[in-house]
């Protein structure tokens, strides 16, 4: 049953298309001074509990491919450029902040069990925030706060178990939760308060 479907923007460029970026040497500590930055964490605990501040002058990409590689990592996305986070493994407790007032978009993709207990903030921006939970337990117990154009897609069984999704009304709010597999949104807490009459905005749930 479709309760309501809000118009949501998606990012047209995939993470793989950022491979041609003129990047820094892939060192997390150098990202802030880059034009564009791409970091791959492919060893256990390689980037765990570290802070990654993206540059303000280019796109930013983080790829996590190993157990615990990005556990409890904190990343602040660029001010006016796109942010791509690919969690194939090891992103338990990751903290992702979309820059307030940014024109850039945030794309987060989580594979099986990868983003458990993650904390994601989708700020009031003119860019979109697109979260794809594509494996069992991929976004288990994730805490998501949104005040902009935000879409969460739960496309595998129990992908978004116990997800906490709070949509705060703002002039740019359009929150959507899409549950496309059996029990994909089991135990989800979806808070979507009414939008004040002085603002536009909408919330949607599609199951």
Image (cartoon, rainbow, N blue to C red):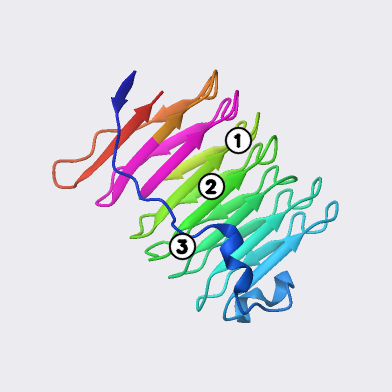
Q: Is residue 152 within the magenta segment? A: yes
Tell which circle, 1 or 3, labels the residue nearer the N-terminal end.
Answer: 3
* Numbered mark located on residue 120 in the image: 2
Dot 1 surroundings within 10 Å: few (below 14), some, or many (20 or more)?
many
Is residue 153 shown in magenta?
yes
Count of numbered badges drawn on the protein: 3
Based on the displayed image, in which of its 4 quarters is residue 133 positioned?
Answer: top right
Q: CA distance from mark 1 to mark 3?
A: 21 Å
Q: Point out the stretch of residues depicted in magenta.
A: 149-176
Residue sticking out furthest to the left: 197
In the rendered view, tell whether residue 162 sits above or below residue 104.
above
Residue 98 in the image: x percent, y percent?
Answer: 48, 58
Q: Nearer the viewer, residue 100 or 16?
A: 16
In the image, residue 183 lies at what x, y percent? 55, 18
Q: Nearer the viewer, residue 64 or 52?
A: 64
Quadrant location of the C terminus?
Answer: top left
Q: CA distance from mark 2 to mark 3?
A: 11 Å
Mark 2 or mark 1: which comes first in sequence? 2
Q: Residue at x 48, y 27 (%)?
A: 180
Q: Residue at x 62, y 81 (%)?
A: 33
**For mark 3, what is the residue?**
99
Where residue 139 is drawn, which disc sits there?
1
Quick one: quadrant of the N terminus? top left
């Amino acid at each position: 049953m479709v309760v309501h479907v809000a118009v949501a923007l998606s990012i047209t460029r995939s993470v793989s298309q950022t491979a041609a970026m003129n990047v820094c040497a892939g060192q997390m500590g150098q990202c802030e001074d880059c034009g564009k930055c791409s970091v791959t964490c492919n060893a256990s605990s390689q980037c765990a509990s570290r802070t990654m501040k993206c540059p303000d002058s280019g796109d930013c990409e983080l790829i996590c491919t190993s157990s615990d590689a990005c556990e409890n990592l904190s990343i602040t996305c660029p001010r006016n450029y796109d942010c791509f986070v690919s969690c194939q493994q090891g992103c338990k407790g990751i903290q992702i902040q979309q820059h307030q007032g940014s024109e850039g978009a945030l794309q987060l993709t989580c594979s099986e069990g990868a983003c458990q207990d993650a904390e994601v903030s989708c700020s009031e921006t003119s860019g979109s925030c697109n979260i794809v939970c594509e494996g069992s337990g991929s976004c288990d117990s994730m805490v998501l706060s949104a005040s902009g154009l935000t879409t969460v897609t739960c496309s595998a069984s129990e992908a978004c178990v116990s997800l906490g999704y709070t949509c705060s009304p703002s002039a740019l709010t359009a929150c959507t939760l899409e549950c496309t597999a059996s029990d994909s949104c089991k135990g989800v807490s979806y808070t979507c308060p009414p939008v004040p009459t002085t603002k536009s905005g909408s919330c949607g749930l599609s199951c």
